[in-house]
Image (cartoon, grey):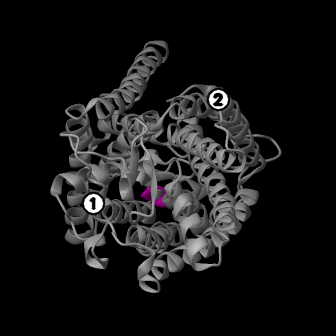
Amino acid sequence: MPQDTSGVKPTLGLTGVTVNAMALIAPGAFLWITYQLQAAATAPDGSSVASDIWAGIGFALILAFLTAISYAQLARIYPEAGFGSCYYFAEKAFLDRENKEHHRWARLAKIVTGWAAHLFYWVYPGVMVAMMATLVSYVYNQLTGNTMSVTSMIIFSGFFAALTGYIAFRGVTGSTFTSLMINVIQLSTLVLFSVLAIYYRLGNPEHATQWHFSGGWDVIRPHSLQGILIQSTIAILILVGFESCTAFAAETVDPHKNIPRAVILSLVIQGLIAYLFEYFAAGFMVSEKLAGTDSTGAAVTGLAAAAASSAPIGDMAIRVGDAVLGGIGFALMITIAVTVGLAILGTTLSCLNTAVRVSYAMAQDREMPEILGALHGRFATPHRAIWVLVVVSTLIAAIGVQSVVGLTGIGLASNFGTFVLYGLTCMWCIIAFAGRPDFSFLKHVLVPGVGLVMNVAMLGAILYLYVIGNADAQHEAYICLGIAGGWAVISVLYVALSGMRTGRKLMPATRSVA
């Protein structure tokens, strides 16, 4: 059912809604904050799959585009979705069927979709908060030589979550301006670093004697199917966000046209162009000169050193700046770190904005606690949901800052919710367009069908490859499944108790599902 968004004014054009989606993808931030996780990824037998970072991103990008097309198609026919996004799409896919028997599935579809969306949208900000704390810890160590304590990182996480919540509380207009500035800054810095990284190898080959990759083709080519699957389960974390603009329908001018365009445009700019370029550049410059020590104190180089560092891109920036720019490596690293921090702020803000809007839509529909369904009188934002999410994000971050295993674990939990949500959305696209006069087999069966299969395959990869992996991989899987399983239990209990209290059936026999 449509949500009450009468207090919200449509102010976002194509640029504004695209910028909000781009802020969540944030390639300038994710190259820095996830490269360690990707470099540290291992196969179940313990062998490194770091050589498949680029290929894993490519596979995840295909999945993302298939899902993005499904979102864009649904947003085109349901521009009245308001804050509901995928939650609204799920219900309408059944309510718009001519066969009234299909209507009874509407409530079940929207509840499953809405609660799955929350596993993604409510864990993801906590992942970003933990990554910001990790970034600050790295810079603190570089400046002082001391190590930031876990307690200090948790305190900082709470402060950063509250700051992001306050910006979101003030309204989407301010959030959009913040996101635009952040995107301009981070993309400019990204191009600078990537060009320098490539020049580091091509312009001065004497900088190293043992490059990790033999050449450009070796960086991008697949090395193993297992490696690609493992890397793609992590890589989806850096690509999600293109769909976030579908939750801004109530705040968008001409959402029928602007939102579908923004979904695809944001993924093309930052996924297809920015990520593939920057990850190629980073891999291209990795050599024995990138050195460090692992958890046992043993000396490591190359991608093994990247796996051991809390900020391998920071280490690369120091190397590049010293070798190419006349010894200003530390200053270059600090400059990039600042832009990364801004980009993480924008990413966290964008996801938080999306998360609370879906929560608001569900609360208005009586499918989540009523406290999440209140709009602030002045700023027209779901302010109570924002502050609840600030607390949740701090708790999630407290797990992530413990170690790279904890950070990977909460990232996998968010990704688990992502694959479930994306798979469901692909399925709703197939159902929504069946029998419509504008039906296209390519756009409404083949594309979402392949997207559904790939998302299910990624769920299987998380469950299989991590559970049978080494001790660290299994610990990551336990964190992921603990968060996902706990959320599933909360979801089922709330729906069951709510049904007992209100008398609403999950699958009503009548056509009314409101």
Circle 2 residue: 391
Q: Amino acid at mark 1?
A: Asp
Coordinates of residue 126 in the picture (x, y in percent): 56, 38
250 vs 416: above or below: below
Residue 450 shown left or right of residue 335 in the figure: left
- Crowding at mark 2 (Cα within 10 Å: few <14, some 14-19, many 20+): some
Q: Residue at x 59, y 43 (%)?
A: 134
The magenta stretch is 236-242
Overall secondary structure of the magenta stretch? helix
Quadrant housing residue 375: top right
As helix, strand or loop, the secondary structure at mark 1 comes to: helix
Coordinates of residue 487 in the picture (x, y in percent): 42, 26
Q: Residue at x 47, y 61 (%)?
A: 242
As helix, strand or loop, the secondary structure at mark 2 comes to: helix
Q: Is residue 305 magenta?
A: no
Q: Residue at x 46, y 83 (%)?
A: 204
Residue 14 visible from this viewpoint: no
Q: Amino acid at mark 2?
A: Val
Front disc: 1 or 2: 1
Coordinates of residue 284 in the picture (x, y in percent): 38, 72
Earlier in the chain: of badge 1 and badge 2, it is 1
Residue 419 shown left or right of residue 373 in the figure: left
Relative depth, front residue between 349 and 117 = 349
Q: CA distance from mark 1 to mark 2?
A: 36 Å
Circle 1 residue: 52
214 vs 294: above or below: below
Quadrant housing residue 387: top right
